[in-house]
Image: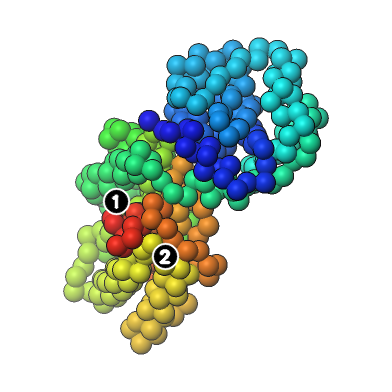
Amino acid sequence: MADIKMRLQRLFAGSAFDSAVIVNSSNKDPNFLYFTDIEGGIFENDILVLSRNRATLITSALEYGIASASARPGLEVLMADTAEKNRRELKSLLEGKTVGFNSSFMPFGYYSFIKKYGAPKRMVDAAARLGETREIKDDEEIGRIRRAIQITKKSLDQIQDYFEYGIKETQLAARFDYLMGENGAQGKAFDSIVSFGKNSALPHHMPDNTRLKPNEYVLLDVGAKYRNYCADITRTFVFKPDKKSARYKRMERIYDTVKRAQDIGFRILKDGADGSSAQRAVEDYIDHAAHGAYKGMFIHSLGHQIGIEVHDGIGMSRAQKILRSGMVVSDEPGIYVKGFGGVRIEDDVLITKSGAKML
């Protein structure tokens, strides 16, 4: 069970605000999930007010039952069944205070509503502070991420039974999503990426009507969601390989290079390490492998933080990011050869003082 009070203490330690306000739009702010730990309901337009000692959810009659039944210690649930009561509760909680808000999520209309009816002394951007608060995962969070990963990996093992000549990328993606649900997923962490052949050279290719052919790459970048937490795993296969062909041998060399690159990143990732150093080490290895044949073909970040959001924090690219124990990050190098195909291998790892641990 989430320790909401501990999460609030972490948020407000050294903060520049007295309270913080989270407002859902048609989607839930990830910080709403973090500070309530509610797993069901829609909670559209609901307001969560955070203070040093408690979180207060102002909700409608539609969601009050779910919220009350799901409330953890430290979460107070108030029902505002009229607009007037909503505004009155908001004012009682925020009037005269310095209030933090999530600028990376809250639309301007909601910001204006809070400022007008909450009557805060001033409002300050708390987006960075909220993100930092979520960086270090507790045992409950790590357990949920691990379960999401297990579901994803089991589904990846099973999906290979559906590789068949002529199947469309869209069909394979649909079958994979079904398998995740059968294996216990509570939704997708993101839209499944399935790409065949030369499409695999496009890191964010979305499934289309391309049909599978023998001796081609099959790349799946996929992730289950379990109790609000995400997995992000990528595997690259070869369908019906012709092991004597020059094409297969080239595919094999690319795959082996990416696998070694992932191992290099894995060995660097640990408490106190600079994520950009791992990025540079992996880039350098790929650029010099095979006498420079893959130079410039690793075109994205080595990894990113994972949690309630699949991209839960700053990426480990050229921007300095010191890793700390309790972070969960991806390790996902790739090589992308335009017109031929690409390989990405991705696993999610837990940062510890002794190094990275595969989840």
The residue type indicated by label 2 comes to Gly
In front: label 2 or label 1: 2
Q: Between residues 94 and 251, which one lies in front from this camera angle?
A: 94
Looking at the rendered structure, the secondary structure element under dot 2 is loop
Question: What is the count of numbered marks?
Answer: 2
Quarter of the figure with residue 29:
top right
Residue 101 screen position, x and y as percent: 67, 40
Q: State the CA–CA distance, disc 2 to disc 1.
A: 20 Å
Kindly tell me whether residue 51 is visible in this rendering.
yes
Rendered position, 167 above or below 79: below
Residue pictured at 34% horizontal, 54% vertical: 350
Q: Position of residue 285 (x, y in %)?
A: 37, 79
Reading the chain from its start, which is encountered first: label 2 or label 1? 2
- Residue located at (73% from left, 34% from top): 97
Callout 1 amino acid? Leu
- Above or below, comparing residue 3 to residue 133 in the picture: above
Per the rendering, the mark at residue 272 is 2
x, y (%) of residue 62?
57, 14
> Which label sits on residue 359?
1
Q: Quadrant of the N terminus?
A: top left
* Residue at x 47% of width, y 77% of height: 296
Q: Residues within 10 Å of mark 2 (few under 14, many from 20)?
A: some
The residue at 25%/75% (across/down) is 249
Query: Looking at the picture, how far across and down is residue 309, in whole percent?
Result: 48, 44
- Towards the viewer: 121 or 311: 121
Task: Judge whether 208 appears above or below 116 on screen.
Answer: below
Direction from residue 352 to residue 133 in the image, left or right: right
